Image (cartoon, rainbow, N blue to C red):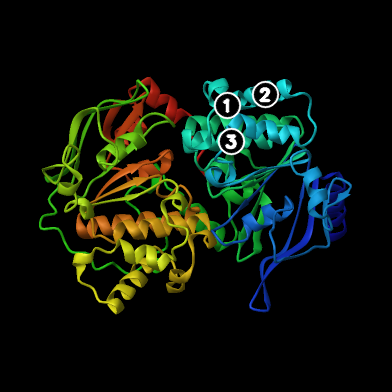
Amino acid sequence: MTIVELQQETDARRASAALTVRNLWVGFARDGRTRDVVKGVSFALEPGRCVAIVGESGSGKSVTARTLAGLTGQGAHVQADEIALGDRDLAALGEREWRGIRGRRIGFIQQDALVSLDPLRPVGREIEEALRLHGWRSRSARRRKAIDLLDAVGVPEPARRATQRPHELSGGLRQRALIASAIALDPEVVIADEPTTALDVTVQAQVLAQLEAAKARGMSILLISHDLSVVAQIADEILVMSGGEIVEQGPAHEVLASPQHPYTQRLIDAVPGSRTRGARLAPQDRATPNLHLPRPESVGRDDVVLEVRDVSKRFAGALAVDGVSFTLRRGETLGIVGESGSGKSTTARIALALETADEGDVRLLGTAWSGAAERDRRALRPRIGVVYQDPLSSFDPRWSVGRILADAIPAHAGLGRAEREQRVIDLLAQVALPAETRVRLPLRLSGGQRQRVAIARALATSPDVIVLDEAVSALDVSVQAQILDLLADLQDEYGLSYLFISHDLGVSHHVSDRVLVMTGGRIVEEGDADRIFRTPEHPYTRELIGALPTPV
């Protein structure tokens, strides 16, 4: 194809595009200077097509997405040769004009459902509000439509869930409510920023099916995702971003099957799964220095460090955990997988003695744990750490990162001020964050950066056991790879034990020695990770694994 023919094809695509972006630059003013974070991005998104933008945290992909929804934020400097929605010029719109477009013509699914949803309003009302703002029908019709939308994105018991507030829903259910709100008015374009991050594989499959159905109706989708398996399922074209620039662009199957840029190759190599078990995911030269953790007296795998015995838990009379038992040995990773609401996170909270079991008990390092008084547990608390699913809600937003980490270092460590400061810097280095991160507030960090700070905080007490509840779910694949390699290195060196809870079956297979499969509060299958994933025996396990996206 000649240069003239290529330009003619490009012009034809732009003429028919639902969304056209040419030479987009976005910068933010700081200390009298503008720092560009998006540099010369161009693409055309046609009706019924999906363009995916992939890249590491800080690559500029989410800023690009927010800019195209009119949500760049104060202090932003946006410049482009063209930003158009069909024949509508978006480049010079004010906020009032954007309110008329956002929701009706451009739907936006944000990454952090807990922050995005109004904590005081039932999720059904949240969806109704999106309809009301654009004058859609009557109040009763909006209520029925909200329930139908929740049902469409896989929310069980949608009429009941519509009356619940965000804190009453799991992370996956909150994310589905956001998706329902974004597609409520069947907009021409949906911008989806990590729409499946918090979803288990079966619900993820439902959501992808909904997005595929929307594509079939002619809806255009701009997908921001760190999950290349998800991208492989739905994207027609992929843009790979690094440092604010597009470093590779092309048809999805070509980019994933035969990546040309070294950065793209690193992203694909970092995807965990059955093929990566026992192997490092990140390039060796990017490894971070080891922490100076005290070595446990014994690192023998016969040492049981955590024992959960026949625990059950009811909420409002309903069984959330039903007779669960397992042991975790020193130096072992035990994965717990299952759908949202399966009981895996409640089981983790019982193991942490943050939730009281109605029946059964837990022993930590051979000592009574769940049934003991908190004052008796205090001495053992540093021996078990935790990384929560939602890092932002676990931090004091007024504290700097340095203060958060310094506060987690035990007083009995006997460190002086300078030593404590150095330990904070070492912890940040362990999770691939620069030392200057310690002066920043959590709200000023990306989702991936916040999750890394949460992992650093868990390491601060030099624990024997770490409970990891979706610990890498907010990380892009390359940073996730570094963290998974780091966890493996620490485990090999110090005999750490991990209780690893994840909806990502590829990650679970990569890291776990043994796996428990939970549904309805019960363990339905357990065993060696390779056996579970390759020859599952229980119908539910087979359903889970069958819902996995096609690996890249």
User: Crowdedness of circle 1 by 10 Å Cα count: few (<14), some, many (20+)?
Assistant: many
Q: Which residue lies under the disc numbered 2?
A: 143
Residue appearing at x 54%, y 40% in the figure: 119
Q: Earlier in the sequence, mark 3 or mark 2?
A: 3
Q: Which residue lies under the disc numbered 1?
A: 162
- Identity, as a three-letter code, of the amino acid under mark 3: Arg
Asked if one can make out residue 309 in the rendered structure from this viewpoint, the answer is no
Q: Earlier in the sequence, mark 1 or mark 2?
A: 2
* In contact (CB < 8 Å): disc 1 and disc 2: yes
Residue 209: image quadrant is top right
Q: CA distance from mark 3 to mark 2?
A: 14 Å
Asked if one can make out residue 349 in the rendered structure from this viewpoint, the answer is yes
* In contact (CB < 8 Å): disc 3 and disc 2: no
Q: Which residue lies under the disc numbered 3?
A: 121
Q: Earlier in the sequence, mark 1 or mark 3?
A: 3
User: Crowdedness of circle 3 by 10 Å Cα count: few (<14), some, many (20+)?
Assistant: few
Give the vertical position of 319 relative to 367 (above or below): above
- Identity, as a three-letter code, of the amino acid under mark 2: Arg
- Identity, as a three-letter code, of the amino acid under mark 1: Ala
